[in-house]
Image (cartoon, rainbow, N blue to C red):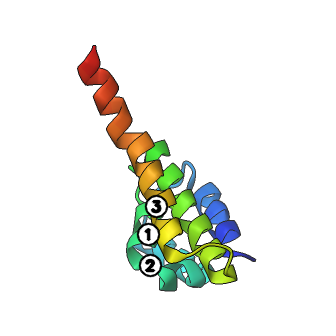
């Protein structure tokens, strides 16, 4: 299973589930690659308040990590792609709002 599959499966497994310490511990074992990659990222996915914007950014980060590991993209270009996503999600909507 790929890192991206782990993310999707974990997210789907959490839909409409009550977050408990026991559940978190089980998911840490089940999705250990994701947890080891970044505990903060794992916690963000686990967070009940994780928004669709957060998920979009997480997906981009994981995809860029995979592409970088394969040698298909440099770290600099991966960082730029993530930055563009952050700009699209957070900055552009604020600028559009200020224009109105």
Q: Residue furthest left?
A: 98
Of 60 and 77, nearer the camera is 77
Tell me where residue 90 appears, x and y as whole percent. 35, 41
Q: Quadrant of the C terminus?
A: top left
Whether tag 2 and tag 1 are in contact, CB under 8 A, the answer is yes
Q: Which mark is residue 24?
A: none
Quadrant of res 67: bottom right
Find the distance from the CA under tag 2 to the CA under tag 3. 20 Å
Labels 3 and 1: the sequence-earlier one: 1
Quadrant of res 44: bottom left
Looking at the image, residue 9 lies above or below residue 86: below
Q: Is residue 50 visible?
A: no
Q: Is residue 61 visible?
A: yes
Q: Which mark is residue 38?
A: 2
Position of residue 99 in the picture relative to residue 36 (left or right): left
Find the distance from the CA under tag 3 to the CA under tag 1. 19 Å
Whether tag 2 and tag 3 are in contact, CB under 8 A, the answer is no
Find the distance from the CA under tag 2 to the CA under tag 1. 5 Å
Tell me where residue 26 appears, x and y as whole percent. 55, 78
Q: Quadrant of the N terminus?
A: bottom right
Q: At x 55% / y 59%, what residue is drawn? A: 60
SS class, disc 1: helix
Q: Residues within 10 Å of mark 2 (few under 14, many from 20)?
A: few
Of 77 and 14, nearer the camera is 77
The label nearer to you, 2 versus 3, is 3
Which residue is the site of mark 3? 80
Looking at the image, residue 78 lies above or below residue 57: below
Tell me where residue 63 appears, x and y as whole percent. 62, 65
Which residue is the site of mark 1? 41
């Amino acid at each position: 299973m790929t890192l991206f599959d782990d993310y999707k499966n974990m997210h789907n497994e959490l839909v409409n589930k009550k977050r408990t310490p026991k559940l978190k511990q089980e998911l840490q074992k089940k999705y250990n690659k994701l947890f080891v990659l970044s505990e903060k990222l794992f916690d963000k996915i686990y967070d009940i308040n994780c928004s669709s914007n957060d998920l979009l950014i997480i997906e981009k980060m994981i995809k860029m990590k995979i592409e970088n590991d394969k040698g298909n993209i440099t770290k600099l270009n991966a960082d730029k792609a993530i930055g563009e996503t952050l700009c699209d999600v957070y900055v552009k909507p604020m600028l559009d709002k200020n224009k109105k």
